[in-house]
């Protein structure tokens, strides 16, 4: 059974940093396209960053220059390093894997507030 488990969400002050992790189990994800999405209250889920199996990355405008997606295939884990966090980054962050099918994690809450 394939499972994605996110961790690392927290309450952080504006300007702070967090690193989210998403570990996949039940499958080897080295050929998968991995991405991070987020969903703020009352809004649609939106893409934040994506990393293809060859390492190519895509970022939304809101993430460029502040967020970095990376992966460790040996650990079946994808990361999202977030710097200079803003209140508008507050959301539930979800990991998504595409490998023949689409898999989602359960999400981790990130709250940016003073």
Image (cartoon, grey):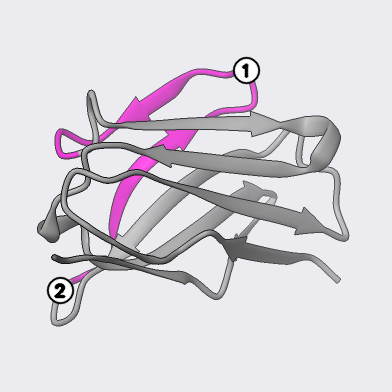
Disc marking residue 68: none
When the figure is inspected, residue 107 is found, relative to residue 50, above or below; the finding is below
Q: Residues within 10 Å of mark 1 (few under 14, many from 20)?
A: few
User: Is 38 part of what is drawn in magenta?
Assistant: no
Mark pair 2, 1: CA separation = 31 Å
Q: Residues within 10 Å of mark 2 (few under 14, many from 20)?
A: few
Residue at disc 2, secondary structure: loop
User: Is 53 part of what is drawn in magenta?
Assistant: yes
Among the 4 quarters of the image, the one containing residue 91: bottom left
Residue under pointer 2: 43
Q: Quadrant of the N terminus?
A: bottom right
Q: Residue at x 41, y 66 (%)?
A: 10
Residue under pointer 1: 54
Q: Residue at x 75, y 55 (%)?
A: 24
Among the 4 quarters of the image, the one containing residue 42: bottom left
Region rendered in magenta: 44-62
* x and y percentages locating residue 111 in the rendered image: 27, 68
């Amino acid at each position: 059974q394939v499972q994605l488990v996110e961790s690392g969400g927290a309450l952080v002050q504006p300007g702070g940093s967090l690193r989210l992790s998403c570990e996949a189990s039940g499958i080897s994800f080295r050929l998968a396209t991995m991405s991070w999405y987020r969903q703020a209250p009352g809004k649609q889920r939106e893409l934040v960053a994506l990393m293809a199996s060859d390492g190519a990355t895509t970022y939304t405008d809101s993430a460029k220059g502040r967020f970095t997606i990376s992966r460790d295939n040996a650990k079946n884990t994808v990361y999202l390093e977030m710097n200079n966090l803003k209140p508008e980054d507050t959301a539930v962050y979800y990991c998504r894997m595409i490998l023949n099918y689409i898999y989602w994690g359960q999400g981790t809450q990130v709250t940016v507030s003073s």
